Image (cartoon, coloured by chain):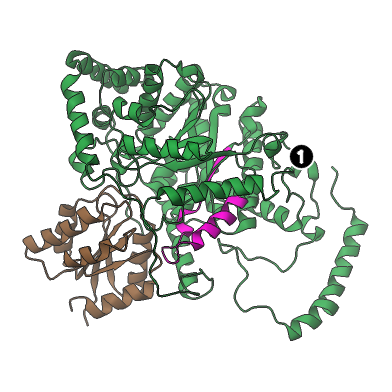
Chain colours: A brown, B green
């Protein structure tokens, strides 16, 4: 079976990368192929990288509070570029009330603080494009 | 030199201890076995069942501890510590517009905080104006947006900056934001030479952990030394740097890594300033530090005590500083944001209390206590007030301020303090082998060490090697029900309008020539501060001034290591 390919990305100016790196490593240890963009990526750069790398999932991490602007923008760009089948997830400091709004805008799952790695791994195994 | 215990006493303790292990402990452990889970600190350091004088065999009081206010300052930097004055209660705050944050400062001051601390939003931290395309979605989210002198004036409107000190968490654009602050004081008719405060201005830990850098390391180090030099000449009461372990720890390091990397950074700044030809006893007294306070009470206290001892020794022995004020390490502490849980947020009040207690028992000079809601959003007014009250209760009710370094002499604490010190020197050796701090950053050494520790900690939680209440044990299904901070939805628009007005109203000739002058100074090796001050008074914005530096110095790109 083909390995699940995941792009972990940090959109915007936020520099908090602890969670993104832990998740990247956790997914890799679970047998997935993981690419990490590094910091300070624009939504355009992230969508571009997702298509170039032919990933199944894009995991967005944002702790600055800019998630409502940046996350849906990535979904939109992927759709525009004909890659709407790539699953987009998010994590970071996201108030509870923003979660349903993000889901409506196409974010498949939001992993807040304290989410076990296992839950994130299971989600990928169940939902990633095969 | 005088050891704490003579040989005959130690022999007796050793003999009695063996007997205790055989008879008393041996019997008890059969019926009441110890838990299976490892006995480790938050940083995964194994901890023994019991510590005795045997753990400090060659231990020398004067070498290790001395008295407070005297070398090596292990017990504290002041001879009276909190018996004269409690630490400065300095709450880190900032969100939305300067108006909203100004209101929060006045609220906190009314409720008894004794120092100010500015949190800037991400565009400000990266030297972008609010209307820059890079700022999209980030305005006022993680702190207050300050793009101009006018914003700084609004931020401190009605606040007596001649009487209260202000700390500003700003790094890449630190000289510019400091310029705004100085300009603000001048416009209030206050001579800058009497204002006091701190700029974080610690770029090395940005590359290592916090990641809000702008320029490459070399020009960044030059800007920092510029501020040192300008500071001791023009603003003698200002701390021109706050060498920070806080963010290193938040990014996932252990306590030892926090200590070792922070001190290594500190020593690097001292070397850079001496290389410029500055007199160590002129700038070193204005160096200050900033540490994290995590959950493990004793580990944290040991860290602060070891920090003071190592710094004093390095300044005196390695750099030959003569002024005792160059030897002492003064530091601010913030409780560990990363320890807060979004689940059952009220539990965070208790975590913060334990962490704040560690900082106080470790002899901090100032303290920020996190609010219980910070795993969800920026703190609400009420949550920030409870966090401040936590400090006041420790200061006035707990009794821990009555005596200095109350845990000094504890076998366990002294063992841990020595352990921290030893491990720190091991890291110093590793960093030296890599060619120093900047080469180690470029090789990704610190970044990798921190990522490894962060991952190990997460694994320990997932594998139930440690318990986090409300996360991997004692969890409840009910969602967090607390009122979160709401910001003015029109704030960004108002801030952009203000910027547009500043650009329209300013004297264009004066503005242009001030930026030309700044470029000239930046391209040469002159101190940039006077040119920044002129540009600030000519209403050049943060983005414009940093734009000049971006052109001259270039930008740094992070290594994407995980």
Residue at 74%, 43% in the rendered image = B65
Q: Position of residue B379 (x, y in %)?
A: 40, 50
Q: Chain of mark 1?
A: B
Left or right, A17 with reference to B271: left
Residue B200 is a magenta residue: no
Residue B394 in view here:
yes
The residue lying toward the viewer, choosing from A36 and B487, is: B487
Along the viewing direction, whichever of B207 and A11 lies nearer the viewer: A11
- Going 25% across and 32% down the picture, which residue do you hit? B543
Residue marked by disc 1: B66
Task: Tell whether B104 sits left or right of B287.
Answer: left
Q: Where on the picture, by quarter, is residue A109?
A: bottom left
Name which quarter of the figure residue B319 lies in. top right
Furthest-right residue in this view: B8
In this rendering, the answer to whether A93 lies above or below A122 is above
Q: Is residue B254 above or below residue A129?
A: above
Image spot of residue A124 (x, y percent)? 27, 75
- Is B260 on the left or on the right of B171, as rendered? right
* Above-or-below relation of B237 to B380: above
Q: Quadrant of residue B93?
A: top left
SS type, badge 1: loop
Residue B333 located within the stretch drawn in magenta: yes
The spot of residue B288 in percent (x, y) is 54, 35
The C terminus of chain B: image quadrant:
bottom left
In percent of width and height, residue B552 lies at 26, 28
Q: Nearer the viewer, residue A90 or B72?
A: A90
Magenta span of residues: B331-357
Residue neighbourhood size for the residue with mark 1, other residues' Cα within 10 Å, grouped as few (<14), some (14–19), many (≥20): some
């Amino acid at each position: 079976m083909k390995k699940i390919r995941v792009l972990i990305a940090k959109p915007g100016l936020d520099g908090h990368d602890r969670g993104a790196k832990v998740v990247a490593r956790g997914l890799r240890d679970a047998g997935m192929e993981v690419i990490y963009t590094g910091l300070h990526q624009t939504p355009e750069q992230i969508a571009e990288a997702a298509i170039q790398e032919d990933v199944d999932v894009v995991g967005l991490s944002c702790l600055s509070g800019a998630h409502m602007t940046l996350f849906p923008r990535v979904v939109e760009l992927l759709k525009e570029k004909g890659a709407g089948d790539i699953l987009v997830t998010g994590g970071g400091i996201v108030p509870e009330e923003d979660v349903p709004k993000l889901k409506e805008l196409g974010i498949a799952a939001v992993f807040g603080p304290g989410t076990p790695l296992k839950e994130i791994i299971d989600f990928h195994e169940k939902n990633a494009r095969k | 030199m005088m050891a704490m215990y003579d040989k005959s006493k130690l022999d007796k303790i050793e003999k009695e201890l063996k007997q205790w292990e055989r008879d008393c402990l041996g019997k008890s452990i059969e019926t009441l076995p110890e838990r299976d889970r490892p006995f480790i600190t938050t940083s995964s350091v194994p901890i023994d069942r019991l510590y005795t004088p045997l753990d400090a065999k060659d231990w020398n009081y004067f070498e290790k501890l001395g008295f407070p206010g005297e070398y090596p300052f292990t017990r504290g930097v002041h001879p009276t510590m909190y018996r004269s004055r409690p630490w400065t209660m300095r709450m880190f705050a900032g969100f939305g517009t300067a108006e909203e944050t100004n209101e929060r400062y006045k609220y906190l001051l009314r409720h008894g905080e004794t120092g100010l601390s500015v949190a800037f939003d991400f565009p400000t931290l990266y030297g972008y104006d609010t209307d820059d395309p890079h700022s999209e979605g980030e305005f006022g989210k993680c702190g207050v947006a300050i793009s101009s002198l006018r914003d700084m004036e609004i931020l401190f409107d009605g606040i007596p900056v001649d009487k209260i000190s202000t700390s500003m968490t700003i790094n890449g654009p630190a000289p510019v934001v400091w310029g705004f602050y100085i300009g603000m004081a001048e416009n209030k008719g206050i001579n800058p030479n009497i204002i006091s405060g701190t700029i974080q201005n610690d770029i090395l830990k940005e590359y290592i952990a916090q990641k809000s850098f702008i320029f490459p390391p070399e020009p960044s180090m030059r800007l920092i030394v510029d501020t040192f030099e300008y500071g001791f000449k023009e603003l003698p009461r200002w701390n021109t740097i706050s060498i920070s372990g806080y963010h290193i720890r938040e990014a996932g390091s252990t306590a030892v890594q926090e200590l070792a990397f922070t001190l290594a950074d500190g020593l690097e700044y001292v070397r850079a300033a001496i290389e410029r030809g500055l007199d160590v006893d002129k700038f070193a007294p204005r160096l200050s530090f900033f540490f994290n306070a995590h959950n493990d009470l004793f580990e944290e206290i040991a860290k602060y005590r070891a920090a003071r001892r190592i710094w004093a020794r390095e300044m005196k022995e390695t750099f030959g500083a003569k002024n005792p004020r160059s030897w002492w390490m003064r530091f601010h502490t913030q409780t560990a944001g990363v320890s807060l849980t979004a689940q059952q947020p009220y539990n965070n009040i208790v975590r913060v209390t334990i962490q704040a207690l560690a900082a106080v028992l470790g002899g901090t000079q100032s303290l920020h206590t996190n609010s219980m809601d910070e795993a969800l959003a920026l703190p609400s007014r009420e949550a920030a007030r409870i966090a401040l009250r936590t400090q006041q209760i420790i200061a006035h009710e707990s009794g821990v301020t009555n005596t200095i370094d109350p845990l000094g002499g504890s076998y366990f604490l002294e063992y841990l303090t020595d352990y921290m010190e030893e491990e720190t020197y091991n890291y110093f050796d590793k960093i030296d082998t890599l060619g120093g701090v900047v080469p180690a950053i470029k090789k990704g050494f610190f970044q990798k060490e921190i990522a490894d520790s962060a991952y190990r900690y997460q694994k320990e939680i997932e594998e139930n090697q440690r318990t986090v209440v409300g996360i991997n044990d004692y969890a409840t299904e009910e969602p967090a029900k607390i009122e979160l901070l709401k910001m003015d939805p029109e704030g960004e628009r108002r801030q952009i309008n203000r910027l547009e007005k500043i650009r329209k109203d300013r004297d264009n000739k004066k503005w242009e020539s001030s930026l030309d002058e700044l470029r000239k100074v930046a391209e040469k090796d002159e101190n940039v501060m006077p040119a920044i001050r002129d540009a600030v008074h000519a209403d050049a914005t943060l983005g414009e001034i940093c734009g000049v530096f971006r052109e001259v110095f270039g930008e740094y790109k992070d290594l994407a290591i995980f």
